[in-house]
Amino acid sequence: MEAKNDIIVTSTDNNAGAVVWWSLSGEVEVGRLAAELEARGVAIDVARPTAHYALRRAVHKVDEQSLFLRALPGRRSGWALVREHATDNDSLEHNVELRTWVDGTDDGPVLRIEPFDHPRAASLRAEFARIGSVLDVQSLSGWLTQCVIPQLVSIALRDNGGFYFMPQPSVETFRRVVAAIEACGGSKFMEIPAMRSEQAVGAVVGALQRDVVAAVAELETELTAADGGLTERGVKTRQARCERLLDIVQTYERSLDISLASMREEVGRVKSALVVAALSAGEGGELFATPTDAVAA
């Protein structure tokens, strides 16, 4: 079924949920947002920016005409500050003034700077720490789409996001999330009710079908690639994903007051294949002895 985005609004009766979208601006302090959510009874964790993202943002704050940024080879997150200057014979020379990267330790990520006493080191450390404690527009958008939307069993109505359908049981929780964010900054959120009209249901079912088909295909690809080599953990992880998919489909059946039997059957087919994989794992013995198998990640 092809998804459409034309939601018909008639009255508050027969309400299937809401269509929501937003315009984000500024920065939100992570600690304050967490406190605002807790005060409103919202049990959704606020994800901090990664150390790699914070470092990339921090080094790009350096603004000097003759100073350039270059990625350090061989490191996931590492940068060099390179000074360019003219020589007596009118050629250009480049000298590395500072190197910085993030190391993973038992106590968490640690910022490294060489030389540690470089004149820019203190400001770089301060900016790295500040960026790691706030959500900018990009980070806040990622938190909304990757944490909030999935936890509230909501779906994007378009392939590239932007507009999201939220089933009626999740609407009130999302409003509390919105209130918490708006208490921290200038972002704006919009909402219109989505009725159980033929066009509205068609748009939502089309979007849900797109997501379910993609999730089932991913699970099938992983099963094929494993070729009987899933660990116990790998089987259980994928079974949990199937259960989550079934919960989502059933939530939409209730919200839209329709049957989505074909979607349930697709998920059930993969779930059955996982039962076979679990039985095979039990017979193999070797399977459960390798919990670090890459496929189980």
Image (cartoon, rainbow, N blue to C red):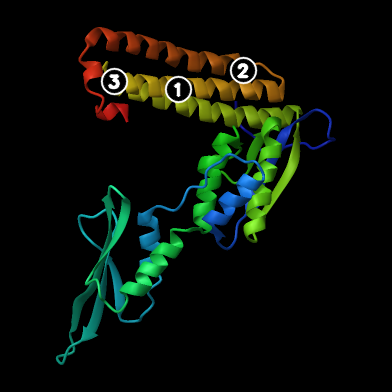
Classify mark 1: helix, strand or loop: helix
Residue drawn at 28 percent across, 12 percent down: 281
- Label ID, residue 204: none
Residue 87: x %, y % from top left: 17, 88
Which is more N-terminal, label 1 or label 3? 3
- For the residues marked 3 and 1, what is the alpha-carbon distance in whole angstroms? 14 Å
Q: Label 2 sits on what residue type?
A: Leu
Quarter containing the C terminus: top left
- Label ID, residue 231: 3
User: Which residue, given by chain and number where applicable, does mark 2 sit on?
Assistant: 260
Q: Is residue 64 left or right of residue 142?
A: left
- For the residues marked 2 and 3, what is the alpha-carbon distance in whole angstroms? 32 Å
Q: Label 1 sits on what residue type?
A: Ala
Residue 26: x %, y % from top left: 57, 63
**Pointers 2 and 1 in contact (C-beta within 8 Å):** no
Q: Is residue 250 left or right of residue 290?
A: right
User: Which residue, given by chain and number where applicable, does mark 1 sit on?
Assistant: 240
Given residues 82 and 47, the one toward you in this image is 47
Residue 193: x %, y % from top left: 76, 38
- For the residues marked 2 and 1, what is the alpha-carbon distance in whole angstroms? 20 Å
Q: Label 3 sits on what residue type?
A: Thr
